[in-house]
Image (cartoon, rainbow, N blue to C red):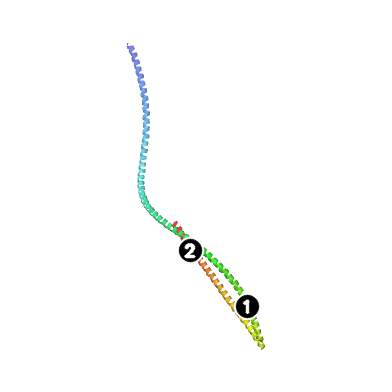
Amino acid sequence: MQGDRSHDEQQKLEKEIRDKTADLEKHKKELALLTNSNKQLLDEKRNITKVIEKVKDDKTKITNVVSELRLENEMIRGELETVVKKKEKTLVSFDVMKLEIKRIKETVNLEADKVYGLENRKYQLEMSMEEREKEIQVHKDILTSELKSAEEERHQVKVELQVRKNKVKNLRIKYEGLTARNKSSSGESDAGEHGQAYYVIKAAQEKEELQRFGDELDGKVKKCEKEIKALLNTLDHLKVRNKNYRDKFMQGAEGADLEKK
């Protein structure tokens, strides 16, 4: 009975040993796991500590940055207030400039109307002056033609006068010769003396008539010359007035262009 119990006890002990051994192995494994876990936790703790230190450093840096940003924000706020004030002044100036531009535009429009009126007046004056110049030119051509005809007629009269003067001269020579012969000869008849006196008087009358006609032609020629000179002076005066008016008009147009700019 004792031998049987011992065997049973031995088996029971062996079983307990096996169970204990199994528990020991299990606990060893758990210990190994716990050791590994503890090691991992320690590593994580060190990492967390490093992270915390880094976070603290980052916090310090961020705090400094925030302080700088706050200071910069205050500065920017002051600058913004300055900019707002400048903007308000600029808007006021802009409104004033708009009013000034509106006034300038109105002035430019008025000046443009004046320029248009001056251009129209200039065109009308140029047309009337052109017509007047044409009339003056036609009148000048007519006077020139009349002057040329008068010159030709005067030349013909001079030639005729010279011919008649020559005839008178010849008659005077003949008369003087006859007179000399009459003085030497007492038997000449009174009828011959009357004939000679008639020719002398007639020649003197023709000379006087030709002289008067020549004087009249000279008067006409001088009158034509004076009229041509007066027309040329009038034409020059019109040209000078036209030039002065054109210069004033160009100055007015340039002034209007500057105001537009």
Measured along the vertical axis of the image, is residue 73 above or below residue 236? Answer: above
For the point 60% across and 72% down, the residue is 153
Occupied quadrant, residue 33: top left
Q: Tell me the SS state at disc 2.
A: helix
Residue with the mark numbered 2:
245
Residue 97, x across and y down, in percent: 39, 54
Mark 2: few/some/many CA within 10 Å (<14, 14-19, 20+): some
x and y, in percent, of residue 63 in the image: 35, 42
122 versus 163 height, above or below? above
Q: Residues within 10 Å of mark 1 (few under 14, many from 20)?
A: some
Q: Which residue is mark 1?
A: 164
Residue 254 visible in the shown view: no
The structure residue drawn at horizontal position 34% and vertical position 14%, both measured from the top left corner, is: 8
Looking at the rendered image, the quarter that the C terminus falls into is bottom left
Pick the front one: 17 or 159: 159
Q: In whole angstroms, how far apart are the C-alphas of marks 2 and 1?
A: 58 Å
First reached walking from the N terminus: tag 2 or tag 1? 1
